[in-house]
């Protein structure tokens, strides 16, 4: 009871809620009672600490505002790292990484186009030496001689065409920068393979169709072809398809 | 956008005592002295983060010293702020480092501040403990005590702002209970009690 009485008096005194008479009486008690004096100091410290906390928050707001106005990268040479500084360091590293990634992204976006991706992914198809019939030998020889226009003329003159004819014609169209016609020829091979047990150039068609689609800017179809190849590790062009950057394909999709 | 105001030393002291002028005065301190104080910490094994913490503490301590009428103006505000920063930073180094000649340096630096200011800095060390205990109070208690002791609002103003209190007497009872709760936590904290008693003895 006595304690509560003192507490209430201490708080009233600290908060200036006493009459002059009460104040004088309390101050007299403070001088005479060491325990009361100590408790008064304790409560006074509590009041000052609360005020100090408010002041600290006020200064902190102006501090943040000032640091922002300096517009500088915070540089730390912390000798005594704290959790606080570890977090800040982490944020700084993240900021630098974002900066680098953003820079890389801008570079990629500005330099990527269908033609560059096609050229960097293209593989020159080497024909095995054939000892077959005359016309086959002729088209093979023309292809090996890189006479692509002649390959196409020979191809068009043929009345009966097999998968190999279409394939060499498709390769020639690609070399002559006529990807639309290459796509048509490659699709013919797919149709032929679908209707026979004697399948030829299956893996080659998958890959070169993907390239032809890239070249013509048909990126969704190119992606489907590449997905088809990379889903099969035994595919002849698995590694080639894997090496084509999906990021670049996404960039091309966005650009389209 | 804030209007940038300039102050003489005497003008700055007066501005810090006026709630409406205080923010402009604090901004002036930042513009004028932050660079110098930061350089001191950076040149004495500190980082920018260390400097930021110490300088904020310096400014808060300086405002409190001014409010309590303990800034005598024997030295310029620039020198006084510098002395507080040195004192606080060396205390920090002493806490972080082992007991070596930093202690001697600390004692030397402490002598550079007058007694009133030096005692206030000692007090601030246990203020931090009290502030941690304050955080353990309920939301309403914290809000009420901040309104009373920081914002200096009257009971009638607080009744208008805080829901759930019918009149000033109910609010006064609540304040009393909150302070009693805080005092009890302080009494239960032995380290704080010892720290406090020693500070009282040193203060005479």
Image: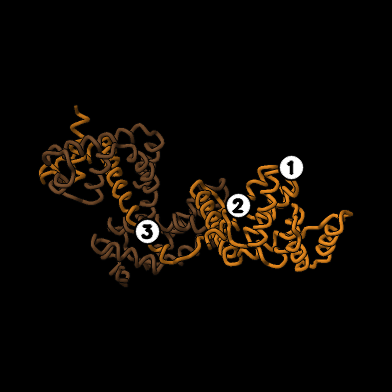
In the image: residue A73, left or right of residue B156 = right
CB contact under 8 Å: marks 1 and 2 = no
Of all chains in the rendering, the one displayed in orange is A
Question: Can see residue B7?
Answer: no
- Residue A252 location (% of width, % of height): 57, 60
Q: Residue at x 10, y 43 (%)?
A: A21
Q: Where, by quadrant of the figure, is residue A11 drawn?
A: top left
Q: How is the image coloured?
A: by chain
Locate the N terminus of chain A by quadrant. top left
Q: Where, by quadrant of the figure, is residue A211 drawn?
A: bottom right
Of all chains in the rendering, the one displayed in brown is B
Q: Residues within 10 Å of mark 2 (few under 14, many from 20)?
A: many
CB contact under 8 Å: marks 3 and 2 = no
Q: Residue at x 63, y 62 (%)?
A: A180
Residue for badge 3? B59
- Between the residue at mark 3 and the residue at mark 1, the CA separation in whole angstroms equals 71 Å
Q: Circle 1 marks a residue in which chain?
A: A
- Residue extending farthest top: A1
């Amino acid at each position: 009871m006595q304690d509560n009485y003192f507490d209430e008096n201490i708080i009233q005194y600290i908060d200036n809620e006493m009459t002059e008479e009460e104040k004088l009486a309390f101050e007299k008690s403070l001088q005479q009672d060491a325990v009361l004096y100590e408790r008064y100091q304790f409560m006074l410290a509590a009041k000052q600490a609360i005020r100090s906390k408010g002041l600290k928050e006020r200064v902190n707001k102006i501090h943040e505002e000032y640091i922002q106005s300096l517009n500088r990268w915070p540089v730390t040479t912390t000798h005594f790292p704290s959790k606080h500084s570890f977090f800040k360091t982490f944020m700084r590293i993240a900021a630098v990484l974002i900066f680098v990634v953003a820079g890389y992204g801008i570079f990629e976006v500005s330099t990527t186009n269908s033609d560059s991706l096609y050229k960097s992914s293209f593989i020159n198809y080497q024909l095995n030496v054939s000892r077959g019939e005359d016309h086959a030998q002729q088209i093979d020889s023309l292809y090996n001689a890189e006479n692509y226009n002649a390959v196409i003329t020979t191809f068009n003159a043929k009345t009966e065409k097999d998968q190999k004819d279409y394939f060499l014609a498709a390769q020639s169209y690609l070399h002559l920068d006529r990807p639309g016609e290459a796509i048509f020829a490659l699709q013919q091979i797919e149709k032929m393979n679908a209707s026979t047990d004697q399948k030829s150039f299956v893996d080659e068609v998958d890959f070169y169709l993907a390239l032809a689609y890239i070249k013509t800017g048909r990126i969704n179809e190119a992606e489907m072809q590449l997905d088809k190849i990379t889903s099969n590790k035994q595919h002849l062009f698995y590694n080639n398809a894997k090496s084509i950057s999906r990021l670049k394909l996404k960039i091309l999709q966005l650009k389209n | 956008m804030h209007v940038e105001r300039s102050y003489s030393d005497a003008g700055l002291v007066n501005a810090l005592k006026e709630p409406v002028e205080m923010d402009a005065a604090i901004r002036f301190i930042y513009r004028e002295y932050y660079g110098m104080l930061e350089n001191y910490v950076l040149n004495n094994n500190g980082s920018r983060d260390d400097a930021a913490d110490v300088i904020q503490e310096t400014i808060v301590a300086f405002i409190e010293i001014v409010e309590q009428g303990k800034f005598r103006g024997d030295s310029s505000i620039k020198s006084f702020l510098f002395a507080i920063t040195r004192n606080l930073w060396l205390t920090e180094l002493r806490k972080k480092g082992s007991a070596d000649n930093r202690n001697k340096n600390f004692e030397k630096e402490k002598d550079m501040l007058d007694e009133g200011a030096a005692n206030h800095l000692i007090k601030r060390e246990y203020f931090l403990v009290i502030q941690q205990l304050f955080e353990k109070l309920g939301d309403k208690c914290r809000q009420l005590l901040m309104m009373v002791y920081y914002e200096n609002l009257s009971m009638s103003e607080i009744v208008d702002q805080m829901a759930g209190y019918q009149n000033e007497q109910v609010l006064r009872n609540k304040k009393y209970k909150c302070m009693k709760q805080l005092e009890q936590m302080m009494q239960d904290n032995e380290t704080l009690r010892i720290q406090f008693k020693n500070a009282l003895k040193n203060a005479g």
